[in-house]
């Protein structure tokens, strides 16, 4: 959408209440597979786009007993019949807060086990599963009524707040499934800085641009200097008509903490890839820098250990010419991956940190 990149993920996760761990694993699996299918090999769909929308039958269930256990209480409903009856009473009372307080997806997000960094709008309607195929809202006895059908979204660090949900509703009169469909609408604010640059380029200020693609709307060919966060930028402004800068970024004190086991035999062999969003923002041939394995006490980092990358091994990052006003909408991406030493194996993503390049002062 102009200079704004969007991704949409639609999926059906593992069914049944007791398959919570499998659902959470499905999420990680989907992200891992998208790392090589959509774009840069080291970035998942959740990291390489400005905004990601994730929707579908995610199959997370209502579990009043698990919510009670998390609060240190005994399970109040020992049988499925009692559990089902209490959930139905909450539905009849319109107590959506009590139902969502026992929602597996909400618990998984809070624990950092799935959909980390994603947002979800307020739900103010009855559970959408499992229902009879009729124009009325009638729940089947063999499943606990649950909010299986969900819509979530995630924005890049420098673009949070650019997406707002304007509506979220269920359609109870639709009778084609044992789910009631859910519909959501959103308002998306494109970057004013990016759109302004396009207008200026088209009106004649084209020395810093090469056409009307996303790249030309953001980048120029001049150099300058700045400072954003703890990164240092140096240089001088080339011309004021486009207010274009060409920053350099220095990273200090790079480390990864409490790494988890990624190999079959335990441990992790972490290395770091530095890139940016937009991907072509870094001024180098591959648009990324690969840092070798971080330093640790052992050759293979054990579970829970940390590793560091010495400052002198992290290169100075040079960015392409970019309008000053666009810097808050660009993001530096630090991806940690586990080196797979198996022949024909794939390196597994461990995590990604997004650093918005906001000017200081």
Image (spheres, rainbow, N blue to C red):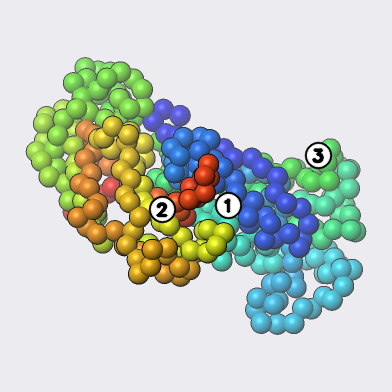
Q: Which residue is mark 2?
A: 336
Nearer-the-camera pick, 157 or 15? 15
| Residue found 36% across the figure and 36% down from its top | 279
Q: Position of residue 238 (x, y in %)?
A: 11, 31
| Residue found 27% across the figure and 42% down from its top | 327
The reply to whether discs 2 and 3 touch (Cβ–Cβ < 8 Å) is: no
Nearer-the-camera pick, 265 or 210? 265
Q: Position of residue 357 (x, y in %)?
A: 28, 47
Question: Residue 321: in sight, yes or no?
Answer: yes
Question: Residue 193: in sight, yes or no?
Answer: no
Which disc number belongs to residue 28? Answer: 1
Which badge, 1 or 3, comes first in the chain's sequence? 1
Q: Is residue 338 left or right of residue 331?
A: right
Q: Is residue 282 left or right of residue 46?
A: left
What number of labels is visible?
3
Quadrant holding the N terminus: top left
Q: Which residue is mark 3?
A: 174
On screen, residue 219 above or below 263: above
| Residue found 21% across the figure and 40% down from its top | 318
Q: Rounded to the nearest whole Å, what is the CA distance between mark 1 and mark 3?
A: 32 Å
Which disc number belongs to residue 203? Answer: none
Label 2 secondary element: strand
Label 3 secondary element: loop
Q: Rounded to the nearest whole Å, what is the CA distance between mark 2 and mark 1?
A: 15 Å
């Amino acid at each position: 959408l102009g200079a704004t990149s969007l991704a949409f993920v639609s999926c059906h996760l593992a069914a049944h209440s007791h398959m919570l761990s499998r659902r959470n694993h499905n999420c990680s699996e989907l992200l891992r597979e998208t790392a090589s299918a959509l774009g840069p090999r080291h970035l998942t769909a959740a990291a390489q786009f400005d905004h990601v929308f994730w929707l579908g039958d995610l199959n997370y269930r209502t579990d009043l007993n698990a919510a009670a256990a998390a609060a240190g209480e005994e399970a109040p409903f020992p049988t499925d019949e009692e559990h089902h009856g209490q959930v139905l009473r909450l539905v009849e009372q319109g107590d959506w807060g009590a139902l969502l307080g026992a929602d597996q997806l909400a618990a998984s997000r809070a624990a950092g086990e799935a959909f980390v960094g994603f947002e979800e709008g307020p739900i103010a309607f009855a559970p959408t599963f499992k229902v009879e195929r009729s124009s009325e809202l009638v729940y089947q006895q063999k499943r606990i009524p649950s909010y299986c059908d969900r819509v979530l979204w995630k924005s890049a660090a420098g673009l949070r707040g650019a997406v707002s949900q304007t509506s979220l509703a269920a359609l109870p009169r639709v009778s084609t499934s044992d789910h009631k469909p859910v519909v959501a609408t959103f308002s998306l604010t494109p970057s004013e800085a990016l759109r302004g640059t396009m207008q200026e380029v088209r009106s004649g200020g084209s020395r810093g641009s090469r056409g009307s693609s996303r790249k030309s709307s953001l980048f120029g060919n001049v150099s300058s200097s700045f400072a954003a966060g703890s990164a240092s930028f140096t240089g001088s402004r080339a011309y004021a008509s486009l207010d274009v800068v060409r920053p350099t970024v220095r990273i200090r004190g790079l480390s990864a903490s409490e790494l988890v086991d990624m190999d079959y035999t335990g441990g992790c062999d972490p290395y770091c890839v530095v890139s940016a969003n937009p991907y072509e923002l870094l001024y180098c041939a591959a648009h990324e820098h690969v840092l070798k394995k971080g330093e640790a006490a052992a050759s293979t980092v054990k579970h829970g250990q940390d590793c560091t990358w010495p400052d002198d091994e992290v290169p100075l990052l040079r960015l392409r010419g970019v309008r000053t006003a666009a810097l808050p909408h660009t993001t530096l991406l630090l991806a940690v991956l586990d080196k797979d030493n198996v022949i024909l194996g794939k390196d597994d993503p461990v995590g990604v940190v997004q650093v918005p390049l906001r000017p200081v002062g």
